[in-house]
Image (spheres, rainbow, N blue to C red):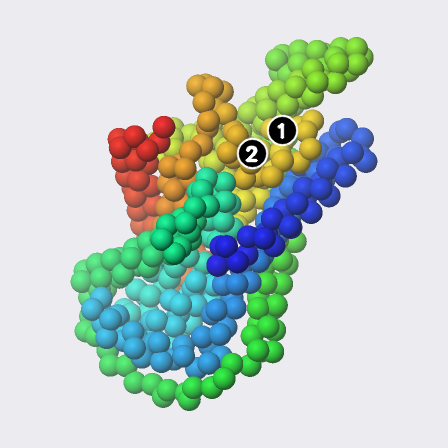
């Protein structure tokens, strides 16, 4: 899936970058140009890059549904799911959660047993939904080399591993819940199997188009709003003696016609503004808690904003890194991540081990407030949604910590 979508993703990435560079050249320097280029185009445009992968995911899910295999898969999975105390009825909501956990949680209404239904609701967010896919694609594209391992590529193996990790975590958590706080007998599963049929390609195309367009609408509304707010938080307040000194030196360089020096000073001014901004302060506040996972304050800003929607992480990083590279043409986010420097050590800020740690965190963490809200409505209580939120995020921190620190102990983080 990653390899199939990559050429189209690269094309969209190039178009977005070129468009941003054109707008940057046309508009005069100032807050308006920064908002449009560094905020809106960098944030929303980068998120749109991942539409091809989401379309491929929806294509295969629609194919299973249209052929009539989905119901049979649920019947086949009944015996396997019975080993963790669930029935085959939980399979379809969980499979739907690979697209989005919200309809998956709503689909649990078909489960009669209340304990089974609550268990399925709690583990549904472990399924890697389409909103996580842009984060996986960004980090894999930036840090995982595109080499073949046997008959598959290494990026493909890493992507599959993220999906497998979510499934494994869901199984373990479900087994623990069904043996402790949600203990109960295994219910019988009876259903009518529809006949096999040839898929309607028109129906599949319409479904893929509709679901992809919903993602684009989300990018054009929620992500746009969050991007504008984030741009403000990452750009203000402006001031401080150090920044004023750099502005004076920048004005002198411009007056002297020293373009290389002026651009270098612009980048330093942008980086200093970002560190002193509201967003930078939040990231710095979180950094001690996330540093053991390999994350810095910029990743911390992305983790905070991703609670609105997981895919916002990509637009957040695009905005943050583009603000930190003012005076240059728009640089693809994957390249910015690879080339980012830790000012304290002078070494690369991020490594493949950090990328794996961050992907593991995203697999296991509950970072979607809409999912929590739907879980509250479906359970008619705040007890289980809060339990789900705390349990998943604590588990994500612990496993990500083990991955990063274990990798460093083995010499993989250097």
Residue for point 49% across, 79% down: 66
Which residue, given by chain and number where applicable, does mark 1 sit on?
325
Residue 27: % across, % down: 80, 34
Q: Which of the 4 image quarters holds residue 185?
A: bottom left
Q: Secondary structure at mark 1?
A: loop
Q: Is residue 294 left or right of residue 190?
A: right
Circle 2 packing at 10 Å, graded few (<14), some (14-19), many (20+), is some
* Mark 2 lies on residue: 336
- The image shows residue 353 at horizontal and vertical percentages of 37, 37
Q: CA distance from mark 2 to mark 1?
A: 9 Å
Q: In the rendering, at what x and y percent does residue 376 appear?
A: 41, 61
Location of the C terminus (image quadrant): top left
SS at mark 2 in the image: helix
Are dots 2 and 1 in contact, CB under 8 Å?
Answer: yes
Earlier residue among tags 2 and 1: 1
- Drawn side of residue 230 relative to residue 359, left or right: right
Tell me if I can see residue 386 in this picture: no
Q: Residues within 10 Å of mark 1 (few under 14, many from 20)?
A: many
Relative to residue 241, is residue 34 depicted above or below?
below
- Residue drawn at 62 percent across, 28 percent down: 325
The reply to whether residue 337 is visible in this rendering is yes
Q: Residue at x 61, y 13 (%)?
A: 242
Which residue occupies the foreground of this view, 51 or 311?
51
């Amino acid at each position: 899936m990653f390899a199939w979508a990559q050429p189209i993703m690269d094309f969209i990435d190039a178009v977005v970058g070129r468009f941003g560079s054109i707008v940057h050249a046309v508009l005069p320097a100032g807050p308006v140009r920064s908002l449009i280029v560094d905020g809106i185009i960098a944030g929303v445009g980068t998120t749109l890059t991942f539409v091809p992968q989401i379309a491929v995911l929806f294509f295969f899910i629609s194919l299973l549904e249209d052929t009539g295999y989905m119901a049979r898969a649920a019947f086949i999975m009944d015996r396997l799911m019975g080993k963790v105390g669930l029935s085959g009825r939980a399979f379809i909501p969980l499979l739907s959660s690979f697209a989005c956990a919200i309809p998956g949680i709503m689909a649990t209404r078909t489960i009669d047993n209340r304990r089974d239904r609550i268990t399925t609701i709690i583990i549904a967010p472990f399924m890697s939904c389409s909103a996580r896919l842009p984060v996986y694609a960004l980090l894999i594209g930036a840090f995982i080399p595109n080499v073949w391992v046997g008959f598959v590529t290494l990026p493909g193996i890493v992507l599959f591993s993220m999906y497998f990790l979510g499934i494994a975590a869901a199984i373990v958590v479900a087994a623990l819940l069904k043996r402790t706080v949600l203990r109960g007998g295994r219910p019988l599963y009876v259903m009518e199997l529809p006949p096999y049929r040839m898929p309607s390609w028109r129906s599949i195309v319409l479904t893929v188009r509709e679901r992809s367009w919903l993602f684009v609408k989300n990018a054009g509304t929620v992500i746009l709003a969050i991007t504008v707010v984030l741009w403000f938080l990452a750009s203000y307040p402006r001031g401080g003696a150090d920044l004023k000194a750099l502005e004076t030196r920048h004005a002198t360089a411009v007056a002297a016609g020293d373009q290389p020096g002026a651009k270098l000073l612009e980048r330093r001014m942008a980086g200093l503004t970002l560190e002193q901004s509201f967003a930078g302060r939040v990231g710095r506040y979180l950094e001690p808690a996330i540093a053991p996972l390999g994350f810095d304050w910029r990743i911390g800003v992305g983790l905070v904003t991703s609670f609105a929607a997981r895919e916002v992480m990509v637009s957040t990083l695009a905005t943050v890194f583009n603000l930190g590279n003012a005076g240059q043409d728009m640089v693809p986010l994957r390249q910015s991540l690879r080339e980012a420097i830790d000012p304290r050590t002078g070494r690369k800020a991020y490594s493949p081990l950090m990328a794996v740690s961050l992907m593991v965190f995203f697999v296991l963490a509950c970072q979607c407030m809409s999912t929590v809200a739907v879980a509250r409505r479906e359970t008619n209580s705040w007890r289980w949604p809060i339990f789900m939120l705390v349990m998943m995020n604590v588990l994500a921190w612990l496993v990500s910590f083990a991955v990063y620190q274990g990798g460093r102990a083995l010499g993989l983080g250097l």
